[in-house]
Amino acid sequence: MKDFFASLPTGKNDKPLLFATGPLVYDFHDIDGLYFMLDRRLSGCLILMWAKQMDDSVKGKVTLDGKPIEGYVLESMELMGNMWILGVPLRGLVTEYAKNYTLHVEGFRDTDGNEMNPQDLTVTGIDREEPKAEYAGHEAIALQTAQEGIVLLKNQNDVLPLKRNTTLNLFGKGVHEFRIGAVGAGKINPRYSTNLAEAVHDRTDYTLNEELSVFYGCDKDLIPPEDMLERAKEKSDIAVMLITRAAGENMDCSTAKGEFYLDDEEDVLIRKLTDTFSKTVVILNVGYPINVTFAEKYKVDGLIYLGYAGMLAGPALMDILSGDVNPSGKLPDTWAQDYFDIPAAQNFYDCADKPRLDAECELFADTVYEEDIYVGYRYFTTFHKKPAFPFGFGLSYTTFVIEPESFCYDGENLTCVVHVKNMGNLPGKEVVQVYIGKPDKTLEKPERELVAFEKTKELTAGEEKELTFVIPKKHLTSYRGEDASYILESGNYRIFIGNSSEAPNCGEFYVAAEEVIKKVTNLMIPGREIETLSKRNPEKTYPKGKDSGVVEGKTTFQPYQERKKYPAVFHGEKPIQPLTYEDIKKNPENVDVFVAQLSVQELARISVCASAGWGMEGIGEAGKVFQAEGLNLPDFPVSDGNSGVNLNMKNIGMPSGVTICATFNKELSAKVGKVIGEEAKAFGVPMILAPALNIHRNPLNGRQPEYFSEDPYLAGVMAGEYSKGMESAGTASCMKHLMANNCESTRKRNQSIISERAIREIYFKAFEIAMEVHMPASFMTAYNAVNGRPTAADPELLCGLLREENRFDGFIMTDWTSYDTVDVAEMVQAGNCWITPGSKDDTYTSQIVDGVEDGRIELARLQSNVAYMIRTMIRFA
Ligand code: BGC
């Protein structure tokens, strides 16, 4: 490759040459592409490189098979060493498998004034991979997860399921912009994928209106010409429209039209369809909740939240549309009627009319969590605000009756016995949800909180099932800061059981005297007063957002006052005879002894990751343990992969986190983790950097699709199951990002200012519940600071909450390049074991060695950090 670059013409008088490093294959299933996360304009573009610096004031001409292409992107890319690229938007144009197209480029000029020679390049549509028998089991899980994660939101006049032998009139640019995954760390690289149009093709009982599909090659939400609409209507009187939105790492979404709200083209198209066709179904192929008031306004009959449903999104959606599979997905989030109905909207950087600040932005920002514990349905139910669709909601083609039979609180557990009966004519699954409304005493409480849920097996028509929920009292507590206690207050506890956060109140139990269930130490207390939302005075306390946003001139945060010190403890003693890695592999109880014999240099070397391939180099792993000389450590690459193994090799493509969560199926979540773990193992990757389970505080968070839910119990249980499944396959999991990583805008310089109660009841709670389900091998800290202290260097968070209070004994790593904004020695001293992605040279190791020398890092801390890492390597490598 080096020789190839060296052979490119770069001299002053050389004409600029456009090139690619391999055959030009366009993958029309990878809707946004690898570079979208850096520059949104590159969505759907084929990327070509220039051998020279280009003059972007000179317009060139680009055609595909003779047809002019508008909207190309000509720019220099920092990530590629400031190389100039040409991004050619080919979405909707290159649509056929293995077909060759001619891309003609001319007229571009370099900064030396040379005009290019016209170039013809052959672009080939990606080849279709046929499913392979050896992966059938894995892909069956991907399919089931998509089927069970799709949520039916509206089904007026029984528009769904669609009758057999119907023609599907698919409208909207989503026909070609059919998204199956998030961008960034949550991206999938599936063996193959099938979009909706292809899935219709693959069936014998439905036909695709091909003319419309070709029309939407325009990649716009245009209204087709009248005669085309007439022909479509003759085929079927049902219109199916796709609304699509991209989301993922590096940038947040906004309230601009085309993001949270419909854009004008979408709005006009929906109105036209509902006027023209007798029935309309809208599919939301979006990674985050959007405004759906159009469904009522235009009397849309069917509404489906598809999300990003992975490689088999198309067939899964067809199974739902046809009724082959009865929908059973439920919303893991409240869908507000309007963005500004969400109290967290007041304290979130919305770039609708401001610059979109990416992750590398150098501005400092504060995000004050004034809504406090009132996140998602906790707000909507307590403050009687009507959402568009409540948390936990999802329709079925059959009807269920949920009848609570008995409740018993015995002083330790609340036991609820519930009957579910399928009253309709079709088999289906239902999700029973138990919420508790705690009494307001010394603490005010949300009107209700989810404490248990269960999805039934498939119940045939008329079948009944009894479910028993045993809820331990620790899950009924609230956190009182005054005495640093998780308490069960005296009074009436109301029980709500049903199939959404609007479940009816069906009973109560009484706690006679207050009980302290767990006594802890106050941690991470914000250094300033936050006026938090209170139902005792909603008008005065409703979030105002005046203290949030970019703080001009700010270059650092004021860290909260530490309350507790965590002196490092390490008991290993140097052996008389040196131990090898092989020795400790056989006798892991000797890890501390092995570590005690290592020099500070060696310890520092192990603590710094050996840089990242990130899809560009090698297999594209996110990082790997450095092979320190003479230590014989095993190969230990780690890879991203909430929904697959994020390498540059094809593998499984599961739905994104929120869709996995929408299944509300614990067993299935474990199976998803197991499949990803097995595929990782086959690539020799012993650790996957997932699950990502940050709370959905605000739907515009770019990483919303990767994360699970607005509710800490649901997110914790589903992510814990996922992690358990993954580790059952012998692959280590990594829960991330600890914690309150709730926006991407200037994420390395953004501090979340949160009350201790909200930390313990919402933001840390998700991780705590997940650890109860399964103690993972590792944790990743977040980029952001909480209450002034970077999470990556926060001893109260890492040594206190995580290790001391929750007995976590795996290893902790930083998020990638956290050292851009956080001191390496501070991270190590706080208990962060692995500095990532690091480098092969001594840039970061020297900072650790210096830190030990000048006393900022205790040697015992460095040793215990390394011991945690090595124990994990022994378990999984
Ligand atoms: C993301 C992490 C990811 C890491 C490694 C970071 O940019 O925030 O979630 O695991 O990169 O790719």
Image: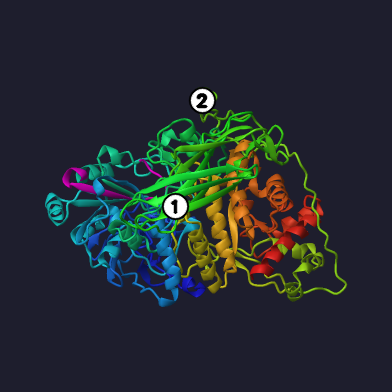
Given residues 640 and 352, the one toward you in this image is: 640
The answer to whether residue 278 is magenta is yes
Where is residue 108? Give x, y as percent. Answer: 33, 59
Residue beneath the point at 43% across and 60% down: 145
Read off the residue under disc 2: 538
The answer to whether residue 289 is magenta is yes
Is residue 791 among what the camera can see? yes
| Label 1 packing within 10 angstroms: few (<14), some (14-19), many (20+) | many
Residue 765 in which image quadrant = top right
Residue beneath the point at 23% across and 48% down: 280
Where is residue 614? Give x, y as percent. Answer: 53, 63
Position of residue 713 in the picture relative to residue 391 (left or right): right
Q: Which mark is residue 662?
A: 1
Identify the magenta region: 274-291
Q: Which residue is the extreme one toward the front?
A: 405
Is residue 702 among what the camera can see? no
- The reply to whether dot 2 and dot 1 touch (C-beta < 8 Å) is no
Q: Amino acid at mark 2?
A: Pro
Nearest to N terminus: mark 2 or mark 1: 2
Where is residue 255? Give x, y as percent. Answer: 40, 39
Residue beneath the point at 20% across and 51% down: 238
Element assignment for label 1: helix
Quadrant, the C terminus: bottom right
Where is residue 130? Give x, y as percent. Answer: 36, 74
Q: Amino acid at mark 1?
A: Ala
Given residues 166 and 477, the one toward you in this image is: 477
Q: Which mark is residue 124?
A: none
Element assignment for label 2: helix
Q: How is the image coloured?
A: rainbow
